[in-house]
Amino acid sequence: MSKNTWWGKTLRFIGILLMALTGGFTLLGGIGTTCAALFPTRWDSMAPLARFQWLYILFVLTGIALGVWGIRATIKLVRGTPDAYITSLKVLVAGITVGGVHIYISQLLRGKSMPVDAVVYMTVLTLVIFLLLRIPFLWQGANFEKGDGNSNRMAGGAAAILLGLLTLTIPYTMGSTHTWNGVNYADAFNLFMTISGVGLLLFGAGILANLKMFQAMANSLRIQERNA
């Protein structure tokens, strides 16, 4: 299976998208834990966490760090660096480990652990897919170190657009688990989330537009060479 076949490009595209979504979801999850970590006594359901406030502040910092690391791993996958795949595996394993501890502690203290569960499920799914991609006959096509630059950039642009949509819609998708006394705390950072989401949409659209422009110029040059 050649690395330049449509099948290989599709596998890399899926891997990059999943890694980007996992990194973004982890980052947003870390930011979303801020309210519970800093002000647990404001809500009856969060009050049991007050005794372990230091731990939840650590979960916030770790979640943000893992999210940034996951986005960095995504950039490595797009660029096709030699350590892209192993870096992605490290991020995913670390995310599942920290997320698993977070779920266990939250279930123990308050009987609930959402939305951490969703982040961990997404991370597990991505890890399973990445491990499957390492199967030899699949790896011949999916090998991120030898991927085609144009197809990888297309995946990067699509990933940025999906992250933008995720950022803009998170107040609604997570509203049911973050609403207390009629206030949706998932919408607490509205201005920051809106600016970030729109920025990611424009960035992703710019990548795809430039890629199409480059491809059009390349095709035009090929036609001129054939007609010369």
Image (cartoon, grey):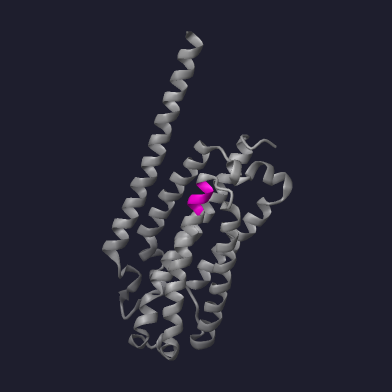
Is 134 on the left or on the right of 46, as rendered?
A: right
At x 42%, y 30%, the residue is 214
Report the residue at 60% width, 53% height from top: 85
Quadrant of the image occupied by residue 60: bottom left
Q: How many marks?
A: 0
Residue at the extreme right of the image, as rendered: 136
Please determine whether, in this image, residue 92 is positioned above or below residue 158: below
Taking the image as shown, residue 48 lies to the left or right of residue 83, namely left
Question: Is residue 75 positioned above or below 179 on the image?
Answer: above
The picture places residue 11, in percent across and down from the top left corner, at 60, 45
Name of the residue lying farthest toward the top = 228
Q: Is residue 40 above or below residue 130?
A: below
Q: Could you say which quadrant of the image residue 9 lies in?
A: top right
**Within the magenta stretch, is there residue 13?**
no
Q: Main secondary structure of the magenta part?
A: helix
Decide: is 4 above or below 168: above
**Residue 48: image location, x then y, percent:** 44, 90
Which residue: 37% across, 85% down?
40
Residue 90 percent location from the top left of the image: 58, 62
For this orientation, the residue located farthest to the left is 191
Q: Residue at x 45, y 60 (%)?
A: 24
Report the magenta residues as a range: 74-78
Q: Position of residue 55 (x, y in %)?
A: 46, 83
Name the one closer to the observer, 16 or 147.
147
Quadrant position of the N terminus in the picture: top right
Give yes or no for residue 77 being in the magenta stretch.
yes
